[in-house]
Amino acid sequence: MAGGRRRGGGGRRGGPRQHPGTPGPASSPAPLSPAATTALPNAGAARKTGRSKKAPEEPAARAPDVDSLGFQAMDRNVPGLSHVILQKLNMKSYEDYKSAMDGRKSGSDFGIRTYFDMFQKMEDTFKFCVECKKLPDALPDPKSLRRCKRCQNVYYCGVACQRANWPLHKKFCKKLKLVALDRLVEWLIFTGDIPFPTDTWTKPAWDVKGWEDWFSMQEQLEEKLGAIVAGRYMTLLWANAGKPRPEDAELRESIRRLVTDFHSRPLTIGLGLRLFGIDPLTRPLTVHVVGASHVETLNTRLTDYDELTRMFPGHQGVEMVMVGVDVVDGPIMRPPLTTLAPRGSVYLSSYKGLYHDFWESHVETKLAAPPDLVVGFHPGFHACPDLLAGWLPTLLLLRDYRLPVLFTVYSEQELKASLQILVELETHIVGYASNPFASLRPEQVYSSPNKPPVYCSSHYIALLGAEAVPGAEELEDDDGWQGGEPSAAAVAGGIAPRLG
């Protein structure tokens, strides 16, 4: 498939996206972030592996450019904002931005020489009046913008705009304070401070019903959080951020939210395996992440999905294949395995291109294993006709091959819009529900922040083939469903879906 894709689920790797406006609220932090500016130069060359056959030459990938649509959406909300972002990134055009997202720009290209430069350039991309939408250059005094003291997130060009905006802003001010804090603390993901080392699960996967249970299994949790708060990079952050350092208790909570953001993807994949009754303890598994982009793959480490090993100790091996037109060169840019995944480990590989091309060139030719599960984090095909058209070949392929599929979305509004499309495509919607492993990090619409925040992978949709396919009633799993109905075990495990 396609590139039809929004900013992905937890643990970002690169500049987030402004979603084009449509049926649901969009999540998009600043296109310039500490994550992007520190991570981009480190997107290294592909590593070689001798485990796969030589793949045929990959066709040129063509799909809707979500980032380009995002820049257009920004300019609709705040005219000229995309030019500010490119300027702060030391770029002349959108093509430069794409080159950076693909890992083809070095650190010196961004014109960032110090930590202060990095954080200041990021903050500058938020400097527009949230009420009248004017940028600093459109004001008589560009320095007249003043930041809300409560949330440290939004700006106003004067008292009149601040007063006019307050009835709306006061509804979101407290949440936007958390957004602004997490946006800065996220940098510690790229320094390696976050996430902290985790422990093998002491409870069976089906007994872990959410983040409270997950945190309860982490030994010496407070000591780990305290070490990050007192660490060198946290000190560097607040010495250069241009904002007052929050209380340690606030920083600890921010770290907890960002840890859930990082681990949301592997734990959501583990949830999908449980829902479909796919047991990693009995055989090696292959999971395809469809529509993967720089969000999942920029600076991705080979160990980023190892939480699956702690979730399923003793598993027979899991291969994660990232497939998408915006997959970034790096350690995981290696061909999919043609043999079984190594026992007891999670092996990451990738393919830069459309999913249906990958299926024809690799799966059908046995250069890659067919998937036991397909996962799409925030596909966004509900957003506009171009994105739906880009996703359509993949959606039909997934439907017609009767592959177990788990999609995630940002909000209940997006869930409803996505379900409507899937119903029209006559897919068999096995179930949908709130995700117990949704990220706890609130996110704002970048250029329209005074809206309810959204959360990565807040809901999931489970699909299996076409509607009314003979034999569909045979789907059965120990934790989940039989004939589309939740079992008692599923209800007890807190993962029972609402039926579509």
Image (cartoon, rainbow, N blue to C red):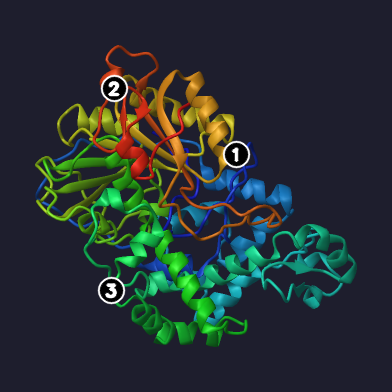
Dot 1 or dot 2, earlier in sequence: 2
The residue positioned 81% from the left and 64% from the top of the image is 138
Which amino acid type is shown beneath numbered disc 2? Answer: Tyr
Judge from the rendering whether residue 358 lies leftward or rightward of residue 295; answer left or right. Answer: left
Task: Give the residue drawn at x 35%, y 69%.
Answer: 195
Q: Nearer the viewer, residue 423 or 156?
A: 423
**Residue 490 drawn above or below residue 246:** above
- Check residue 219 in the rendering and tell me which mark sits there, or answer none: 3
Are there few (<14), some (14-19), or many (20+) residues within 10 Å of tag 2? few
**In the drawing, what numbered circle is on residue 413?**
1
Using the image, determine if residue 423 lies above or below residue 7. above
SS label for mark 3:
loop
Residue occupying the point 41% across, 61% down: 260
C-alpha span from label 3 to label 1: 37 Å
Query: Counting residues from the N terminus, which is met first, the one under dot 3 or under dot 1?
Result: 3
For residue 148, side relative to residue 340 (left or right): right
Q: Secondary structure at mark 1?
A: helix
Amino acid tagged 1: Gln
Residue 401: image tag: 2
Instruction: Examine the image and state in which quarter residue 193 appears.
Output: bottom left
